[in-house]
Image: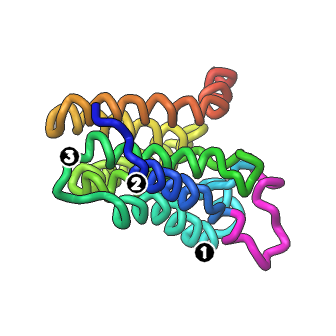
């Protein structure tokens, strides 16, 4: 594995800071609602959706954008994404999940990680998006508890499977690591499911 040079380290720091912009909080400005005090308390798209669909749409665009923008700004599309691309991607997702603007708290990382994948593997990411929509609609129709968490983590399992078939082993390893991290971020959701069982 190549060493991390100063430029790449600074780019990763910039990706972290971009990822840390709390769009869920910003989207609620003027509403009189602190999204961290309602619903699940999670500053992310799904919690904003409980309050306002238009503000949730802004949150989704912002959260996906802060995963996509670091790739757009710093990643050379001609390079192998398995190292620099994923480093920038993890940095952006960690920024979202552990935002210094929110006391190193944050959302669960699904929308931001989706933006990262859209930048690195657009075709696979679009397939993942279709899969997510289908599972999410099925969950809504069947009234699954924690349907959003199930669809989100299932989509990352699906995406990791696609990297196994179409990308390098390093990409698959990184996708599995991201899947495990995001599943861990949703541990409360899965604990709720187990309590319902």
Under tag 2, what secondary structure? helix
Taking the image as shown, residue 62 lies to the left or right of residue 120, namely right
Q: Is residue 129 above or below residue 190?
A: below
Q: Tell me the residue that label 1 is attached to.
A: 54
Q: Which marked residue is nearer to the observer: mark 3 or mark 2?
A: 2
Residue at x-position 49% and y-position 62%: 66
Q: State how the image is colored.
A: rainbow
Percent coordinates x, y for residue 99 in the rendering? 66, 51
Which of 181/16 is in front? Answer: 16
Q: Can I make out residue 196 in this image?
A: yes
Q: Tags 1 and 2 in contact by the CB under 8 Å rule? A: no
Q: Residues within 10 Å of mark 2 (few under 14, many from 20)?
A: few
Range of magenta residues: 25-39
Separation of residues labelled 1 and 3 (CA atoms)? 37 Å
Q: Earlier in the sequence, mark 1 or mark 2?
A: 2
Q: Tell me the residue that label 2 is attached to.
A: 7
Q: Residues within 10 Å of mark 1 (few under 14, many from 20)?
A: few
Which of 39/176 is in front? Answer: 176
Q: Which marked residue is nearer to the observer: mark 1 or mark 2?
A: 2
Q: Earlier in the sequence, mark 1 or mark 3?
A: 1
Separation of residues labelled 1 and 2 (CA atoms)? 38 Å
Query: Residue extending furthest front?
Result: 6
Q: Tell me the residue that label 3 is attached to.
A: 80
């Amino acid at each position: 594995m190549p060493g991390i040079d100063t430029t790449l380290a600074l780019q990763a720091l910039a990706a972290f800071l971009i990822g840390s912009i709390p769009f869920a909080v910003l989207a609620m400005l003027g509403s009189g609602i602190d999204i961290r005090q309602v619903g699940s308390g999670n500053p992310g798209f799904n919690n904003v959706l409980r309050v306002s669909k238009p503000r949730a749409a802004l949150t989704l665009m912002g959260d996906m954008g802060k995963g996509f923008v670091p790739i757009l700004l710093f990643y050379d599309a001609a390079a192998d994404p398995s190292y620099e691309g994923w480093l920038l991607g993890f940095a952006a997702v960690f920024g979202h999940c552990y935002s210094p603007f929110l006391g190193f708290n944050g959302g669960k990382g699904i929308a931001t990680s989706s933006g990262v994948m859209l930048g690195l593997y657009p075709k696979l990411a679009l397939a993942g998006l279709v899969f997510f929509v289908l599972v999410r609609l099925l969950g809504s129709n069947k009234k699954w508890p924690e349907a959003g968490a199930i669809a989100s983590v299932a989509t990352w399992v699906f995406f990791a499977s696609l990297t196994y078939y179409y990308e390098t082993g390093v990409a698959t390893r990184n996708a599995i690591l991201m899947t495990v991290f995001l599943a861990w971020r949703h541990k409360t959701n899965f604990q709720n499911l187990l309590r319902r069982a």
